[in-house]
Amino acid sequence: MIVGDTLHAESDDFEAIEYRESLKPLLEALEKLKASSYSIVKREDKPTSSKPSAPFITSTLQQAASTSLGLPPEEAMKTAQKLFEEGLITYHRTDNPNFSAEGFQVMRDMLHREGIESRATQIKRQSAALAQEAHEAIRPTGIPDTELTPSQQQLLSISEPRNLYRLIGERALCAVATDGLDVKSRVVLSGEHIT
């Protein structure tokens, strides 16, 4: 008998949910199933929800840029500096995981322009001890694409700044989005050659 758990996203979440490690045993079991005859004995679906990730602070931006974009931390900071100098993002050296009241509203407005529901109030996140909170979390400044200056357009025509800008924007939008709704499925199979 094989028992496998997996999640099926039913929301338009901005961040891809990583299942690779949790799915490894299930994928190995599926390989065995290809050569077997089996039946589904039982299936249980249970709704779940997940809170959105916090907006970026300096350290998490560096980590995500390295993991997602392959940018070394110093390169990510140089690129973020250019985005900041062009007025495309807020200050990128911050330990504050919260938006200002104005910043929260800017991000909500960006979501609403896309027809996506946002949360009514900001999730207040705890800062690390001794954190420098003079600046809000990193986010786009909310300039609509139609209002970008020629120099902003030129910067965003380069892949590195464009990709980092997109990464910052997706995380910031996710932070003000409603909780993700998922379904956790549990399936029990029975048949020959199934262990």
Image: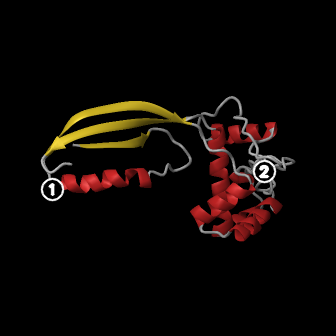
**Nearest to N terminus: mark 2 or mark 1:** 1
Query: Quick one: which residue is furthest to the top in this view?
Result: 120
Q: Position of residue 100 (x, y in %)?
A: 80, 40
Residue drawn at 78 percent across, 57 percent down:
92
- State the residue position of label 1: 35
Amino acid type at circle 2 is Asp
Residue drawn at 74 percent across, 40 percent down:
126
The quadrant of the rendering that contains the N terminus is: top left
Q: Position of residue 7 (x, y in %)?
A: 41, 42
Q: Secondary structure at mark 1?
A: loop
Query: Quick one: which residue is furthest to the right in this view?
Result: 134
- In this rendering, would 17 be left or right of 185? right
In the rendered image, the vertical position of residue 150 relative to residue 173, given as above or below: below
Report crowding for label 1: few under 14, some 14 to 19, many 20 or more residues within 10 A (C-alpha): few
Q: Is residue 84 visible?
A: yes
Viewer-proximal residue among 45 and 189: 189
Amino acid type at circle 1 is Ala
Viewer-proximal residue among 100 and 129: 129
| Colouring | secondary structure
Viewer-proximal residue among 114 and 193: 193
- State the residue position of label 2: 95
In the rendered image, the vertical position of residue 121 relative to residue 152, given as above or below: above
